[in-house]
Image (cartoon, rainbow, N blue to C red):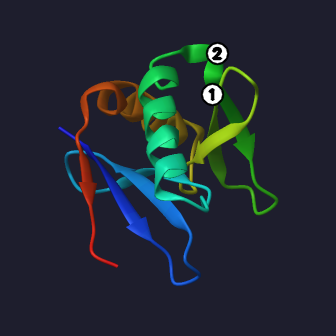
Amino acid sequence: MGKFELSKRKNGEFQFNLKAGNGEIILTSEGYTTKAACVNGIESVKKNGPVDGRYEKKVASNGKFFFNLKATNGQVIGSSQMYASESGRDNGIESVKKNAPESPVVELDS
């Protein structure tokens, strides 16, 4: 099973990463000014992660593939790493769908 890792950045903002069972980061959040807002972001991923229509499949200017997970209001909750292929990106989406709903939250020391 995967896990959410909640941490504090050097600039004081909070962020989370959703990691798959193998430890690979499959989704990274934006920076949040408060820990509570970051926790709300994690809850949003748990709720929106299983919904197909919440994923925006993108291609970066360098030709790599990635995706954004969006909330019902259209705001980006998290972004994936860059993938070399469309199939890799699609596997990343499936991994978020599978891992997000049940993954525990682990706080990392700053």
Query: In which quadrant is the C terminus drawn?
Result: bottom left
Amino acid at pointer 2: Gly
The residue furthest right is 61
Rendered view: 9 above or below 93: below
Q: Position of residue 77 (x, y in %)?
A: 61, 41
Residue 42 - label = none
Check disc 2 and report its element: helix, strand or loop: helix
Residue 53 - label = 2
Residue at image location 44% in from the left, 56% down from the top: 16
Residue at image location 22% in from the left, 40% down from the top: 104
Q: Which residue is mark 1?
A: 55
Amino acid at pointer 1: Tyr
Residue at image location 44% in from the left, 40% down from the top: 42
Q: Position of residue 107 (x, y in %)?
A: 27, 60
CB under 8 Å between discs 2 and 1: yes
Query: In which quadrant is the N terminus drawn?
Result: top left
Report how far apart the C-alphas of labels 2 and 1 lie in the structure. 6 Å
Marks counted in the figure total 2
Could you tell whether 110 is left or right of 85 in the image? left
Check disc 1 and report its element: helix, strand or loop: strand
Callout 2: few (<14), some (14-19), or many (20+) C-alpha neighbours within 10 Å?
A: few
Q: Quadrant of residue 60?
A: bottom right
Q: Nearer the viewer, residue 96 or 35?
A: 35
